Amino acid sequence: MKGSFFLKSFFLLILGFGFITAGMAQKETKLLRQGNTLYKQGKYKDAEMSYRKALETNKGSVKGQFNLADAMYKQKNFDESSRIFGSLADSKLDKETKAHVLHNLGNSYLEAHQYDKSIYAYKQSLLNSPQDKDTKYNLEYAKAMLKKQQQQQQQNKNQQNKDQQKKDQQQKQDQQNSNKDQQKKNQPDQKKISKEDAERMLEALKNDEKKTLEKVKKQKASVQQANIEKDW
């Protein structure tokens, strides 16, 4: 399964690196080979089942675990492939094998967009195989993706702050509108009282005017009466 991420092949570890010992049971060997054949045919789910059966025969099989993780990777189950590769990376392996495991662990994390973890895995792989060009390439790619991810997260944070400010302003405006509506609801009673007062005032003015007119009429009548008496 050694290989790099984008633009380069991702190879299954078939029979190399001395993973199959001379004392391995014939059943395990048969199941592993069957899994490899299925894998080459693109039947990753079937290959997974063969590898799992092989591991039932020999739980400590590095090759079985490695190829199972590869099959999980091909099925895009990156959580499971990273779990298996991570467990293998903690095992006692020769440097070359460990470099391959860590490289593929980095690929699993990369696919899962866990760029910080993939960077760490690639760096650990390079400690065991410093000249590996594929790992160097993937490391730089992971760094670029991490930077892009962080920038996107910052943009999202800024947008969330803007959205929150807009929400707060809207809530403030809604509260102001609510207060205005409440004031309007209270105004009818005031208008009603004012109208009644106005009617009473108008009625009072009418009464005053009537009294004034009557008074004027009386005064005119008195003047006329006086004039009549004087002529006599």
Image (cartoon, helix red, strand yellow):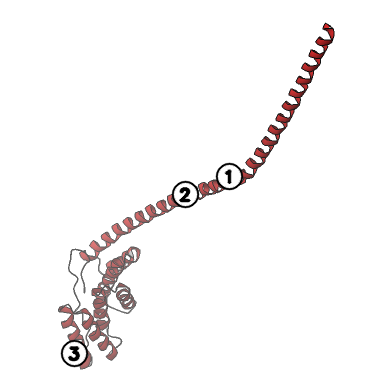
In the depicted structure, whether residue 217 falls above or below residue 149: above
Towards the viewer: 187 or 78: 187
Q: Quadrant of the N terminus?
A: bottom left
Q: Nearer the viewer, mark 1 or mark 2?
A: 1
Looking at the image, tell me whether mark 2 or mark 3 is earlier in sequence order: 3
Looking at the image, tell me whether mark 1 or mark 2 is earlier in sequence order: 2
User: Callout 3: helix, strand or loop?
Assistant: helix
x, y (%) of residue 151? 35, 54
Q: Nearer the viewer, mark 2 or mark 3?
A: 2
Give the residue type that dot 2 points to: Gln
Q: Which mark is residue 102?
A: none
User: Callout 1: helix, strand or loop?
Assistant: helix
Left or right for 20, reference 203? left
Towards the viewer: 27 or 21: 27
| For the residues bearing labels 3 and 1, Cβ distance under 8 angstroms | no
Residue name at image x 56 percent, y 47 percent: 181
Give the residue type that dot 3 points to: Lys
Q: Which mark is residue 30?
A: 3
Left or right for 197, reference 68? right
Q: Which residue is mark 1?
A: 184
Q: Quadrant of residue 86?
A: bottom left
Q: Residues within 10 Å of mark 2 (few under 14, many from 20)?
A: few
Distance from the alpha carbon under mark 2 to that under mark 3:
65 Å
